[in-house]
Amino acid sequence: MAKPGRAAPAAAAAKALHDGLVVASHGRHCLVETPTGERLICHPRGKKSQAVVGDRVHWQASEDEGTIEQVLPRRNLFYRQDEIRTKSFAANLDHVLILIAAEPEFSEHQLARALIAAEAERITPIIALNKSDLVEPFERAWTKLAPYRRMHHGVLPLSLKASGEADYASLMKLLAGKSTLVLGPSGSGKSTLTNLLVPGATVLTQEISQALNSGKHTTTSTTWYWIDEARTTGLIDSPGFQEFGLNHIAPMQLAGLMPDIAEHANDCKFYNCTHLHEPGCGVIANVETASSGPGAISASRYKIYGELFAELSQKRY
Ligand SMILES: Nc1nc2c(ncn2[C@@H]2O[C@H](COP(=O)(O)OP(=O)(O)OP(=O)(O)O)[C@@H](O)[C@H]2O)c(=O)[nH]1
Ligand SMILES: [Zn+2]
């Protein structure tokens, strides 16, 4: 039997805290990557501090798996919240890339909601419109996106299937050295994009979800991929773009989170203007009309503002 004094260094080694990055999560299990690139399954310690993809953690070894001892402070957390639950997508993001396509037709509401959620966490949104090879539907979608092309950083046109190489270059200009969450409705080309940027991503995802769920076939969970070998550019894939709940946002915050509306929200007569009906409202005065010039707030964006304001005012606490 080892003398008590001898056991101390081994016990200390087992208790050592290591740095890690959460690269996938399934239920309460996570896949954690070490600074040298090894990956291991970790479980949270107790009920608190559920880690999400993108989290930096301190973990401790326990046999061949690990325990997450601490989730380090996050710089942001991208999530949606409806009446029933909160769903966290990922933490510590530089960008949210919203991928929509000429076909199937995208929902402007959904797009506006995702942009507001990104803005609320100070994450730079990038909008990309895929399938530019489908000329007519692309033209229609491009026109519908006019207010969005003037905001944020414009809209990036893509044709992921037809001109992958050129798209790879234009995407990498924006994404290099950053961590980016990809979101988009079904059929917009998310898998095509992920496989273009990370060849073999689909296979990797299957392996990860099997590891996290003891080999059972599961729906894909949120997964972090490295685009480059040096592991500086991260791409995060996440299922689920429907029902983008914004219950965590107060109605009076909304205008500030919609850049085209925010631009005029300081020109109102009343400091607590809701921009819905007040006289002397800078927003209402700038909503596009038949005779308004460029730079006006689009009627569809103002309508979405009103609908969201009503929805968020009704929420129950
Ligand atoms: N015409 C055209 N089709 C494309 C383009 N990019 C992707 N597609 C097609 O669009 C369909 C959907 O692409 P996916 O990459 O599977 O889309 P997804 O967003 O992953 O879809 P889900 O798996 O349903 O979430 C596929 O049939 C692709 O081949 C493009 O640039 N042009
Ligand atoms: Zn106003």
Image (tube, grey):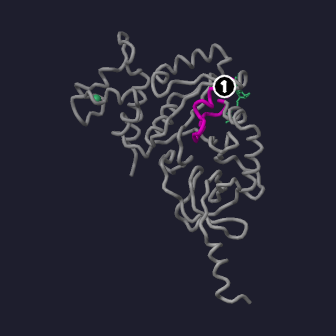
Circle 1 sits in a helix, a strand or a loop, which is it? helix
Q: Write down the region rendered in magenta.
A: 166-188
Quadrant position of residue 5: bottom right
- Inspect the magenta stretch and tell me whether residue 180 lies in it: yes
Residue 46 percent across, percent down from the top left? 56, 68
Q: Quadrant of ligand 1?
A: top right
- Inspect the magenta stretch and tell me whether residue 241 lies in it: no
Residue 29 percent across, percent down from the top left? 65, 59
Residue occupying the point 22% across, 32% down: 270
Residue 222 percent across, percent down from the top left? 64, 47
Where does label 1 land, which residue?
167
Quadrant position of residue 182: top right
Question: Horizontally, is 210 left or right of 149 in the view?
Answer: right
Q: Amino acid at mark 1?
A: Asp
Between 228 and 88, the one lying in front of the other is 228
Residue occupying the point 49% across, 42% down: 245
Residue occupying the point 40% across, 35% down: 257
**Residue 225, can we see it?**
no
For the N terminus, the image quarter is bottom right
Question: Horizontally, is 63 left or right of 253 in the view?
Answer: right
